[in-house]
Image (cartoon, rainbow, N blue to C red):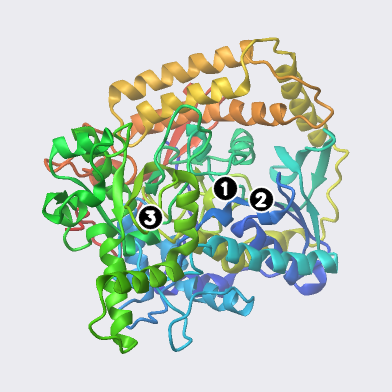
Amino acid sequence: MGILDSKIPSGPLAEKWTKYKNEIDLVNPANKRNIDIIVVGTGLAGGSAAASFAELGYNVKTFCYQDSPRRAHSIAAQGGINASKNYQGDGDSDYRLFYDTVKGGDYRSREANVYRLAEVSGNIIDQCVSQGVPFARDYGGLLDNRSFGGVLVSRTFYAKGQTGQQLLLGAYAAMNRQIHRGKIKSYTRHEMLDLVIVDGKARGIITRNLITGEIERHSAHAVVIASGGYGNLFFLSTYAMGANVMAAWRTHRRGAFMANPCFTQIHPTCIPVSGEHQSKLTLMSESLRNDGRIWVPKRLEDAQAIREGKLKPTQLKEEDRDYYLERRYPAFGNLVPRDVASRAAKERCDAGYGVNKTGEAVYLDFDAAIMRYGSEKALTSGLKNTDDGHIRKLGEEVVEAKYGNLFQMYEKIVDENPYKTPMMIYPAVHYTMGGLWVDYNLQTTIPGCYAAGEANFSDHGANRLGASALMQGLADGYFVLPYTIGDFLADDIRTGPIPTDSVEFDKVEKDVLDKINKLMSANGTHSVDYYHKKLGKIMWNKCGMSRNVKGLKEAVEEIAALRKDFWENVKVPGAADDKNQELEKAGRVADFLELGELFAMDALERNESCGGHFREEYQTPEGEALRDDKNFKFVSAWEYKGEPKDAKLHKENLIYENIELKTRSYK
């Protein structure tokens, strides 16, 4: 196996980042104006990186397939962003945030990167407050916090249920300032189709204008991939419909290793699937688990009656309800990590206790919280001897102030009032911890090519704790990449502009056109969605919440066969040199059909259970994940060798000097 150089600085953990910043090469302001950087993706990671680069003086080009950076999928993050400021005085610290993140990831993340993330987390909040992000505040006007799964402190800053949207607006405003100054050239409705490497360094990209169909060349001295995760591989997920893996996968095909592709998160708090007609799923924020209690009926006959519509959940007495997370994990209760909560919901539903028509849903109940908040508000308002109806009304007002937009969204989709009857939830694909392998500098195995946010693998191990995605994206963009990329670009102050009329650009553009022509010339009968749905079912059934050796081997073979059929029988209507959304989808699904096979191979290679990767052969008697630290304490980094079956596995051994590896327990 190959050896990967993570370039982790020497010295004590808490001093590595400071030591690193003191020793890197710098680019002086006069030279920065002669250096170009391309940023692919304008969500929180890409938008914050682009704004920071431009503020420093670099010339930046940004690319996104949406009509505006404001439409990045980062807006869908609802519940909050973590930071170890200890505003609640409940014992939080940089070390505790670091520890919770490594433990939450089931000890499969890199210590140095995670500690840096915790170290800069407080700066993110200060940055966003200065941008005007309307974080929630307490009665005294101070920033408020709530708790998320997998922790015993309140460290999550939030803006009602719209945190991602508000943070993205802050980054977008910072970008707009630089666009107005001429330091950022924003290319919307452009999709990256390939990476160009010149003399061993990433020097540009080939894009397609999604409005005109024109193929374009863009050069730079460095390229940052911040294009998000690959959860739409499963077809049904909480991702935006357009979210895809193209930028990362095409970069992988050019030599960037793909790390831990099987580490994919299933979020426990999503609106359940209602039928075959659906094209996506909707997330209900994990913040709801602060106040909502998760339960199913204790008796199978009650669950059956609820599914048949003969019994309402509000008619079931308290003693007839199984609050299974509180029963199994009393220390953390409903706030166990996402992988634990997801598997527990699946176990209850598989046992026959599901509560919707498909049998794949559990309840998230706010009745107790409403009455608790109502009683508290009545007392603080000087209301004595008030009746339950008035208390309930007061409690609903408090819950509405905290979660109102989420409740409204649920009611619009499900047509049930969650203030009056419990929500129904079920796990769904939500986030990918795997991604492009990067070192401590966030540089891939291609010099000059960086990956940020969900597009890289670096911080979350086998399971991401809630409210850490926004933290990582903004940490990478605002506080990490502006330092690390300068260390690389210090060698380019005399390079001059990178020409786009070179043989390297010619070759990559030809490869792009050949692939487009191949897609357009396939005169089949099946739509792109036909193949995407088939792939999604294979992935969910055999590579989803639980996996086993038989199913994974079948998945590898079935995906390879499906990919062969796709290239022979897909039908892409329209023209290549015009607006063509089917062609866009075809390119993305072609990449998913390669990634899916590598995903299954990665899951097959890892003979253990850890975090979101649950192999049925490796579990404790209680049904919990059973790690194998002796044999699998490493990052899987796959090198592209043509067909997915030929990919070469490299291993980065994880060294834990500051944390003792323990059986991950939330009891």
- Amino acid type assigned to the residue bearing label 3 in the image: Pro
* Mark 1 vs 3, N-terminal side: 1
Split into 4 quadrants, where in the image is the N terminus?
top left
- Left or right side of 261 for 322: left
Q: In the rendered structure, which disc, 2 or 1, sits on the residue that comes first in sequence?
A: 2
Disc 1 residue type? Gly
**Distance from the alpha carbon under mark 2 to that under mark 3:** 36 Å
Q: Are marks 2 and 3 in contact (CB under 8 Å)?
A: no
Task: Quote the CA–CA distance across marks 2 and 1.
Answer: 8 Å
Query: In the rendered image, which residue does mark 2 sit on?
Result: 41
Point 35% across, 81% down: residue: 88
> Which residue has dot 1 on it?
228
Report the side of 94 relative to 123 (left or right): left
Name above or below for residue 376 compared with residue 54: below
Say whether residue 608 is visible.
Answer: no
Q: Which residue is mark 3?
A: 418
Locate residue 590: give its quadrant. Answer: top right
Q: Earlier in the sequence, mark 2 or mark 3?
A: 2
Q: Quadrant of residue 513?
A: top right
Instruction: Give how far across and how far down residue 438 sits, in percent.
Output: 53, 50
Separation of residues labelled 1 and 3 (CA atoms): 31 Å
The one nearer the camera, 48 or 130, is 130
Is disc 1 placed on a helix, strand or loop? loop
Q: Element at badge 2?
A: loop
Q: Residue at x 62, y 55 (%)?
A: 43
Mark 2 and 1 residues: CB-CB less than 8 Å, in contact? yes
Front tag of 2 and 3: 3
Q: Position of residue 500 (x, y in %)?
A: 85, 42
Q: Position of residue 97 (x, y in %)?
A: 36, 68
At label 1, counting other C-alpha atoms closer than 10 Å, the crowd grade (few under 14, some 14-19, many 20 or more) is many
- Specify the amino acid type for callout 2: Gly
For residue 57, say whether it is visible. yes
